[in-house]
Image: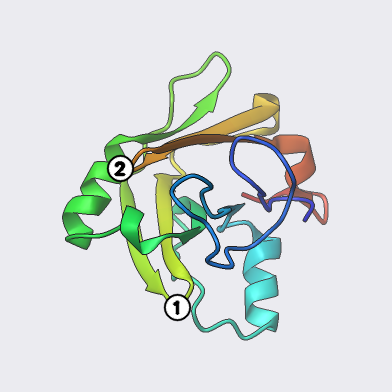
Amino acid sequence: MGGPGGGYPGGGQRGGTNDGTGTDNEPAPLKLRWESALPIRAAELKARDTSAPTLDADHYAIAVYGVPSRMASGDSKSLANQLKKQAAIKRDGKKDLKPSSVDVLQRDDGHVIVYLFPRSKEITRQDKRVEFDAKIGRLQFAQSFYVDDMNYQGRLEL
């Protein structure tokens, strides 16, 4: 999947979904994407995806799909607060962006974790590359996004 979509956090093969075959020795693949990007939102609308996360215009949103239930168990509010402390968008030469909130959503194929970052901390073309780093339970991962690849119809879409 090109553009603002993700793939396997930490590199590896792009794309993929959680088919539930992961074990403790071999974690199920996660899908990470820049959820607030216009092409993603348009695709969800066109597909009539009623399970898509609800977002507002004030935040960048990065979603991690297919998080196994065992990694997101317990009280969702306390889990969200813990996940909020363990995530950041990193930009070269700038202060890390920390999420203002995290939503933990239950889906049939696992949990979706949605990290919301304030748009008041603008990401621009000059940032070139941003890296999303997070930890969910014992799983720590990072995914780079190249800003030049996140243009849609001549505009930066985050």
x then y, percent, for residue 116: 41, 50
- Horizontally, residue 37 falls left or right of residue 52, namely right
Identity of the residue drawn at 26% across and 52% down: 80
Residue at mark 1? 108
Q: Secondary structure at mark 1?
A: loop
Tell me, for residue 84, which label it has, or none: 2
- Horizontally, residue 73 falls left or right of residue 54, namely left
Could you tell me the amino acid type at mark 1? Answer: Asp
Q: Nearer the viewer, residue 65 or 119?
A: 65
62 up-or-down from 135: above or below? below
Compare marks 1 and 2 and give the one earlier in the sequence.
2
Q: Nearer the viewer, residue 46 or 83?
A: 83
x then y, percent, for residue 145: 66, 37
Tell me, for residue 30, which label it has, or none: none
Q: Which corner quadrant of the image does residue 98 belong to?
A: top left
Q: Which marked residue is nearer to the observer: mark 1 or mark 2?
A: 1
Could you tell me the amino acid type at mark 2? Answer: Lys
32 up-or-down from 42: above or below? above
Placement of the N terminus among the 4 image quadrants:
bottom right
Residue, far top: 93
x then y, percent, for residue 96: 43, 25
Residue, far right: 153
Identity of the residue drawn at 53% across and 47% down: 26
Q: Residues within 10 Å of mark 2 (few under 14, many from 20)?
A: many
